[in-house]
Amino acid sequence: MQDMSIERIEGKAFGATVTGVELRNLGDDEFAAIHAAFLEHGFLLFPGQHLNEQESADFGRRWGELEFGGQALANQRKHKDGTYGEIFDIDSQLMRTNLGNEAWHTDSTYKPYSSKCAMLSAVIVPDEGGQTELADMRSAYAELDEATKDRIADLSAYHSTNYSQANDLGDFPQSNGEGAYGTVYHGEAYLRPLVKIHPETGIPSLFVGRHAFGIPGLPREESRALLRSLMEFVVADERRVYRHDWTPGDTLFWDNRFVLHRARPYDYSKPRYLIGTRVAGDASELAYLPDDPRAEAGRQALAAELAILRTEAADRRYGATTAAR
């Protein structure tokens, strides 16, 4: 404990670097200090950890039930012996999904339970690009003018990754497909407030991102303009945006309840391998379940929006298509 150091990220409204600790051998006092720093700063950078997949999952479990743990996030096909080979085609659904993650978002807002927190650990990184950026919606909300705060106080938006893929990339994944993508592109849309009260600190923040659309009570264009303006406000101040240039061994851990993130482009023909762990939200992150009567309004809103985007998104990267594989 005496060797651990927690230093604020210079020039930023959020974030801290933690050194002098090993996440794979973390004592209770060290974890308590890290937990307090996490709530204060929103994200923590742990250089030089070199976690493997099991160690990543083990650390995640200290924060709650996992959505997934120690998952290889690589652009290469994994062999049975654990090695990596063929790089996935840019038109595959895996890479379409990866490219979608290059727009600002928080994890799992498109599921009944939005994610509590998440982490990435770097194993192989490209020579150029491939950074991860984070943005602070807590300080952004604090700096909004009062008129905007009043306007959005009681507004909500639907969240769907079927929407965001179509809107951002012209990618229309099959809903309820087999495997992992069936849990991501499921055809549901969940209503979440534009202003989120953090369940542990009580501090309000904006809660927007690429998955958000269709504010009930507003015309489509007004809804789109408001969501776009709020997102642009969050990232307009460089104090609210942190870009991490990966070094193998780094671990980055953030609070999905008020921190946005996105990946940055790189040469997709080059290997990139990070380890991801995502902690599920508790009851405070529940919108509603698919069998709740409220869910039908979300399905209808999503279907109507996708019908419009079939035409509007035809000029985007994937031309309003569905991946063949």
Image (cartoon, grey):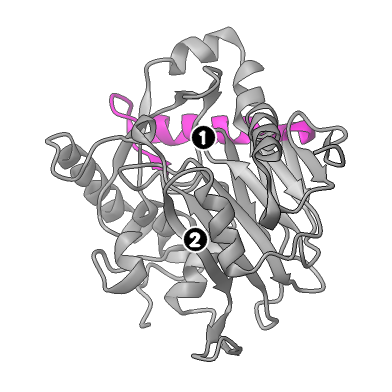
- Magenta highlight: main SS: helix
Report if residue 88 is visible in the image.
no
Q: Where the N terminus falls, by quadrant?
A: top right
Query: In the rendered view, does 215 fall on the left or right side of 272?
Result: left
The residue lying at 11 percent from left, 35 percent from top is 293
Left or right of 267 in this view: 148: left
Q: Position of residue 81 (x, y in %)?
A: 54, 91
Q: Is residue 97 above or below residue 1?
A: below
- What label sits on residue 176 in the rendered view? none
Question: Relative to the observer, which residue lies in front, 229 or 182?
Answer: 182
Quadrant placement of the C terminus: bottom left
Residue indicated by mark 2: 69
Magenta extent: 212-240
Between 146 and 190, the one lying in front of the other is: 190
**Number of numbered markers:** 2
x and y percentages locating residue 37 in the rendered image: 70, 31
Residue that numbered label 1 is attached to: 257
Residue 41 vs 315, above or below: the answer is above
- Amino acid on which disc 1 is placed: Arg
Q: Secondary structure at mark 2?
A: strand
Q: Is residue 59 left or right of residue 111?
A: right
Give the residue drawn at x 30%, y 40%: 190
Residue 237: quadrant of the picture: top right
Name the amino acid type tagged 2: Gly
> Which residue is located at x 29 percent, y 48 percent?
305
Q: For label 2, count other residues whose C-alpha is less than 10 Å away and answer few (under 14), some (14-19) or many (20+).
A: many
* Residue pictured at 38% horizontal, 37% vertical: 282
